[in-house]
Image (tube, helix red, strand yellow):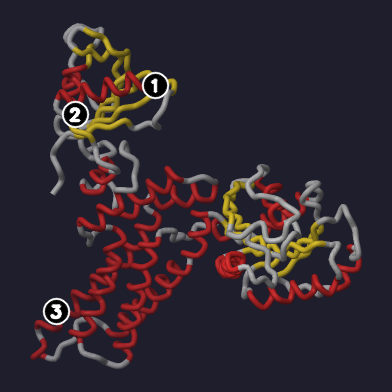
Amino acid sequence: MIDQATICAIATSPGVGAIATIRLSGEEAIEIADNVFCSPVKNKKLVDQKANTLHVGTICEEAEIIDEVVVSLFRAPHSFTGEDVIEITCHGSAYIQQRLLELLLKTGARMARPGEFTQRAFLNGKMDLSQAEAVADLIASSNAANHKMALKQMRGGFSSEIKKLRDQLLHFIAMVELELDFSEEDVEFADRKQLIDLTEKIEKLLNKLASSFKLGNVLKNGVPVAIVGETNVGKSTLLNAILNEEKAIVSDIHGTTRDVIEDVVNIDGTAFRFFDTAGIRETIDHIETLGIERSYNKLEQAEIVLLVTDLSNPIDLIRQRVELIRERIQDQKLIIVGNKADLGGNVKIKEMLDAFILSENEDLVFISAKQRQNLEALIELLKENANLQQAEGTDVIVSNIRHYEALTNAHQAVVRVIDGLHNGISGDFLAQDIRECLHYLGEITGEISNDEVLGHIFKNFCIGK
């Protein structure tokens, strides 16, 4: 049941700004606003005004004018929440915002809970659950790729795909269950060949959607890049150079970095999540050993591995470190970074070029992290290997772990349907597996949900959204 109370909250970011917006939603939103709004036009009331209009005036508490404001008026069902909505745009003083909020609460509204405006939009049928979650992703988007993905989902790209699947399955399960009602007549209303074709098509689409989660997770959280190598080769110096700040401690002492240091940087609209790891070497220090183990764990999570080597080291030692990392990674991109190119040393660049035969999934670049020489070449390699080309297409990309789990469960159910059809199992078992698939698809859009799931989703929203 939808709470009928009129809710209010500050919808703009906290702090001082030029303007701020306070939002009201509910059956009494317009009446409550009328009690505090004073128009320069004599006897003008908001309740008498048309929808989608702006009104200039003041907010007053008895005879005291609190602020000059602009009031936006929206009427149900043509509003974000599907209810009557008032948005009061005032000056951005924190004091004014608080006074207006206290006045609205005193006049009959209550404070909105986190995400309650979007939750009401969902409950009132203005959007489905996956679109509501995309609202939060859009607010949190920090790069162009993430923004584009969230906007596509908020506008229903993902929802429409799921709805098509459910509609097709609903038709067939109706036919299968009709057969069960006439089981004694030995009739077949659902064409098994058509059902096989449909479920195989659905299985491929579900598998494609679930497989897109890896890319979606990268778009949402940043391309994971692990910076690895032995101690004192310049890993922390490289991280600081890329981030353009002193994030990691740099020292000549071996084993300075004992834990994974993580930070995100936006490069031309793409977020990269860098992990500066502990130097890989033989050690009896227990704490440093734990850090090295975490370094290996980050290799598994990374999409791109930057293996930093010291050009002043012997070629055999560098080759040994490269082979060690090659054994530890699978299909990740490996970029071998020859650092300290400004110093030269025992290994010349040409010698190193001759020493390595690179696979298609490997690159070699020479830099000086300390002097910031040739960093642009390394950045270009990162951009080229971010593997975000798929995001430029029109395909739906899954970025939400809840959606991924539901798609995986739905895929398993539809695989059982396909196996059952090929093995000629009875309609009641087919219906059970089809219904399970429908259940998990419905969980994504909110057609099947519970208070616990809804509470978990909307608690992560900001108050005014």
Name the disc covering residue 178, or none. Answer: 3
Q: Distance between the residues labelled 1 and 2?
A: 22 Å
Q: Where is residue 282 in the image (x, y as percent from the top left)?
A: 69, 72
Query: Closer to the N terminus: mark 1 or mark 2?
Result: 2
Distance CA(mark 3)–CA(mark 2) = 48 Å
Mark 3 and mark 2 residues within 8 Å of each other at the beta carbon: no
Q: Nearer the viewer, residue 351 or 122?
A: 351
Residue shown at 70%/50% (left/top)? 250
Q: How far apart are marks 1 and 3 (CA)?
A: 62 Å
Q: How crowded is mark 2: few (under 14 residues within 10 Å), some or many (20 or more)?
A: many
Quarter of the view holding residue 11: top left
Instruction: Decide if residue 428 is on the left or right side of residue 222.
Output: left
Please state the horizontal and vertical placement of residue 185, each as a whole percent of the image: 9, 90
Q: Which of 320 and 436 is in front in this view?
A: 320
- Disc 3 marks a residue whose amino acid type is Leu
Apparent side of residue 316 relative to residue 224 in the rendered image (left or right): right
Circle 1 crowding by C-alpha within 10 Å: few under 14, some 14–19, many from 20: some
Secondary element at image label 2: helix
Q: Could you tell me which residue is drawn at 39 percent across and 65 percent down?
A: 404
Of labels 1 and 2, the one closer to you: 1
Q: Return the residue at label 1.
A: 92
Task: Select label 1 or label 3 by which is in front.
Answer: 1
SS at badge 3: helix
Give coordinates of residue 465: x percent, y percent. Answer: 32, 39
Tag 1: amino acid: Gly
Question: Residue 289, located in which quarter of the rendered image?
Answer: bottom right
The x, y position of residue 375, in whole percent, is 76, 50
| Label drawn at residue 429 | none
Residue underneath mark 2: 29
Where is 180 relative to 155, above or below? below
Of labels 1 and 3, earlier in sequence is 1
Q: Which amino acid does label 2 sit on?
A: Ala
